[in-house]
């Protein structure tokens, strides 16, 4: 059975969060039942999330082209 892809993580003010692009929210790693929507974040954190998305999607695109 294939292992599912792990969600990327971001650190905000010393707290690690999972970034879920499908639901457009972040969740604390130690309390995944809590969520914060991307729209509720400061612009600097939104920029970090955009950077993560660009890295993840670019890598996936390059990986499929190489196969």
Image: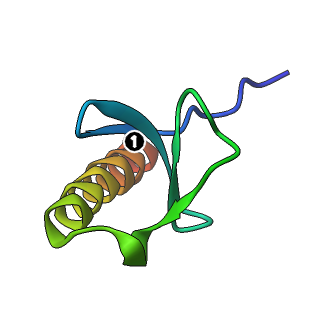
The residue sitting at the right extreme is 1
Q: Horizontal placement of 5 versus 63: left or right?
A: right
* Residue at screen point 29% across, 57% down: 49
- Label 1 residue SS: helix
Residue depicted at x 18% and y 64%: 47
Residue 29 location, x and y as percent? Answer: 53, 31
The number of discs equals 1
Q: Measured along the vertical axis of the image, is residue 37 above or below residue 15?
A: below
Locate the N terminus by quadrant. Answer: top right
Q: Identify the residue position indicated by label 1 in the image.
A: 63
Across and down, in percent, residue 5 comes to 60, 34
In depth, the one of 67 and 35 nearer the eye is: 35
> Which residue in the rendered view is the most extreme toward the bottom?
39
- Residue at position x 42%, y 48% from top? 60
Of residue 1 and residue 51, the one placed in the foreground of this image is 51
Q: How is the image coloured?
A: rainbow
> Could you tell me which residue is drawn at 44 percent across and 39 percent down?
17
At label 1, counting other C-alpha atoms closer than 10 Å, the crowd grade (few under 14, some 14-19, many 20 or more) is: few
Nearer to me, 59 or 7: 7
Vertical position of residue 42 compared to residue 30: above or below? below
Q: Is residue 62 above or below residue 49?
A: above
The answer to whether residue 35 is left or right of residue 48 is right
């Amino acid at each position: 059975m294939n292992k599912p892809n792990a969600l990327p993580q971001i650190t905000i003010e010393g707290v690690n969060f999972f970034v879920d692009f499908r639901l457009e929210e972040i969740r604390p790693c130690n309390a995944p039942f809590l969520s914060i929507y991307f729209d509720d974040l400061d612009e600097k954190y939104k920029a970090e999330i955009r950077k993560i998305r660009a890295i993840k999607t670019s890598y996936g695109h390059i990986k499929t082209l190489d196969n």
